[in-house]
Amino acid sequence: MKSLQSNKTLILAFTFLMALLYLGCGKRATIDNINESKEDLLKSLGLVNAKADETTEDIESAYSQLKTFLDAKDLSDETIKKLETHLESIKAKSDALEGALEKSEDNGSELFSMLTSRAEENQTYREKMVTSIEMKEEEFESKIKAARKVMSKIEKSVQKYDDIVGFFQVNKALEGIDDYILEADQAIKSGNLLNEEIKGHINDGLNLVGEL
């Protein structure tokens, strides 16, 4: 009886180990899987571009609305409710952009991991292949890293809007209103630059993947 129980334990342990090994290996490097991974990466990078447009446009709109209310010195409860609604909108869009960027990063890691694993199995051209893949992966990672820096600027812009709305929620006094108008103006001017910057990095990534 003890021997039977011991055998069951060994079988379960072996099954668990094989499952871990299978999960750790990821997809097998077939041409279909490689093409599927490339397609997933291209789609996620394209989604980053779309979400970047939506996010920066909404941030610019939010700050423009804020400036209109400040210029009119209109900070009624109804006005603040409108600011709150816009705040939730830009937060949601910023989160969606962050999610798309993370997905692109994950898809890139999966693709390059698959390619590297397959290249390392090659007895004849391994060194050349692995070196080439590593160079492309480093280049891709540098584009994602640059895009993340722009993402950080976008998040700061959202946080600044959040802080301004929070101030008016707590204290509707109009002291220092000129400073807020100036900040709104600056945010509007920088919106297009942020969008162009993040899309530039993502487009570089798209071109890079297309070369694989």
Image: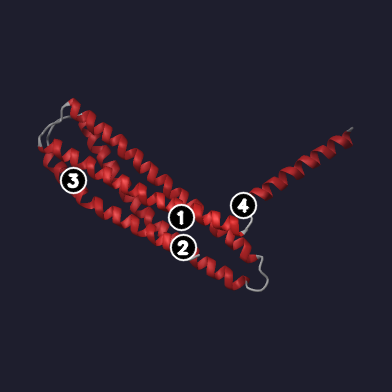
Q: Please indicate, yes or no, whether residue 176 appears anywhere in the rendered image.
A: no
- Indicate the secondary structure of the residue bearing disc 1: helix
Q: Residue at x 45, y 48 (%)?
A: 102
Q: Are marks 1 and 2 in contact (CB under 8 Å)?
A: yes
Decide which of tag 2 and tag 4 comes sooner along the chain. Answer: 4
Horizontally, residue 127 falls left or right of residue 196, namely right
Q: Are marks 3 and 2 in contact (CB under 8 Å)?
A: no
The one of 3 and 104 positioned closer to us in this rendering? 104
Residue that mark 1 sits on:
42
Question: Which mark lies nearer to you, 3 or 2?
Answer: 2
Question: Which mark lies nearer to you, 3 or 4?
Answer: 4
User: Residue 47: x percent and y percent?
Assistant: 40, 49
Q: Residues within 10 Å of mark 1 (few under 14, many from 20)?
A: many
Q: Are marks 3 and 4 in contact (CB under 8 Å)?
A: no
Amino acid residing under circle 4: Gly
Amino acid residing under circle 2: Gly
Decide which of tag 3 and tag 2 comes sooner along the chain. Answer: 3
Amino acid residing under circle 1: Leu
- Indicate the secondary structure of the residue bearing disc 2: helix
Q: Residue at x 38, y 59 (%)?
A: 203
Horizontally, residue 156 falls left or right of residue 63, namely right
User: Residue 116: x percent and y percent?
Assistant: 59, 62
The disc label shown at residue 183, or none: 3
